[in-house]
Amino acid sequence: MEEIECVVIGAGVVGLAVARAIALQGREVLVLEAEGAIGSGISSRNSEVIHAGLYYTPGSLKARFCLEGRQALYAYAAQRGVPHRRCGKLIVATSQAQVARLEAILANARVCGVDDLAWMSGEEARALEPQLACVAALHSPSTGIVDSHALMLSLQGDLEDAGGIVVLKCPVARAECAQEAIVLIAEDGTALRCRSVVNAAGLGAPSLARRFDNLSPGFVPREHWAKGSYFVLPGRAPFRHLIYPVPEAAGLGVHLTLDLGGQARFGPDVQWVESPDDLVVEGARAAAFEAEVRQYWPTLPTAALQPGYAGIRPKISGPGEPAADFWVQGPREHGVPGLVNLFGIESPGLTASLALGQHVASLLTSM
């Protein structure tokens, strides 16, 4: 039986960041990915936004790792030449009824440690974005965008330069957990004896954890799949900043984000689905998207939005429930030696990836 010091399951942005951090400690690490390419799941189906950390519960892992990760990500992208832009965003109140909610976001962000937000009147916001309609706005200069694929390739390069290996098309079937080691059994029957394992399987993390013997079911959350569809606008958008409405549901509203070429995409909305494979963008949803977008961009051309792509949020809280924090579980929580499970790593997981990687690597060091 093959033996290796550490295995990370999942080659999304978080799994790669975790494996990179472990490899840079001089430790032997192998990444197992079920698909035929890195980052083909959640990491390739999001807004590619570098979040400032405005919305999360103070003291939560989301708040902590978003702030730490944002600073680390900007520094890393600049150092490695990963395409990115600190374009900033405007969170907009389109009615007086939303102003109090905007004030609450400002207060929450300050408690979380975000100290660069600026309050703007509607006139001040329109001075930045003439096409915008709002009565007030918050300007977040620390929000930006990043090429997530270039980021993951860079993380993979760092990992491999430090001696780590990524193995594709290697789904894990189950694991046998003992005091001295964890034995991973792949679907093709290959067995690996590991000193430590990190479950960074994204949407599949809870399902995978249920196949680890000796892990109590009480430590595995129920998964909920919140689909988010995106529509795109052909050509170049008349905005330089990201535009976010005041959030009023499970997501952050149908916001306007930009790619590095300046094309606008709108979304994601929230649609609870029964399967993580439900990735079809329904053209009939365009009318609802247009209605929401016109709240802050009233001159959006009629029938201009075209179906783009969809992603699934790996939620561990269901419809009508408060949003769950990241779950980072080690042996101190679940009692299985050598195992770290990452559950519910939805937004701001991309922003938080480098900070999460350092945190998990430090957990493994202390085991």
Image (tube, rainbow, N blue to C red):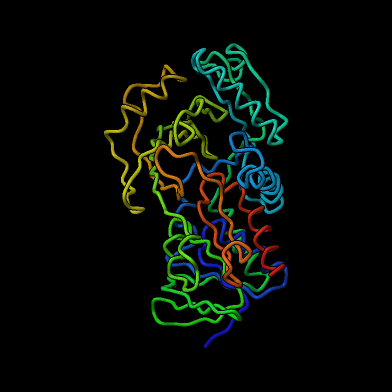
How many circles with numbers are drawn on the protein?
0
Q: Residue 237 in the image: x percent, y percent?
A: 48, 28
Depicted 76 relative to depicted 109: above or below: below
User: Which quarter of the figure has residue 318?
Assistant: top left
Q: Quadrant of residue 122?
A: top right
- Residue at horizontal 60 percent and vertical 19 percent from the top: 128
Which of these two is toward me, 286 or 315?
315
The quadrant of the rendering that contains the C terminus is bottom right
* Residue at 59% from the left image edge and 56% from the top image edge: 328
40 or 185, which is in the foreground?
Answer: 185
Residue drawn at the location 62% of the way across and 39% of the way down = 85
Q: Residue furthest bottom?
A: 1
Q: Is residue 84 above or below residue 210?
A: above
Q: Nearer the viewer, residue 95 or 332?
A: 332
Q: Position of residue 205 (x, y in %)?
A: 47, 60
- Residue at far left of view: 284
Q: Is residue 48 above or below residue 42?
A: above
Using the rendered view, name the quadrant where residue 169 is placed.
Answer: bottom left
Whether residue 101 sits left or right of residue 24 in the image: it is: left
Considering depth in this image, is 205 or 351 the residue closer to the camera? 205
| x, y percent for residue 304 | 35, 27
At a point 45% along the width and 39% down the height, the residue shown is 321
As drawn, is 110 to the left or to the right of 144? right
Q: Position of residue 296 (x, y in %)?
A: 47, 20
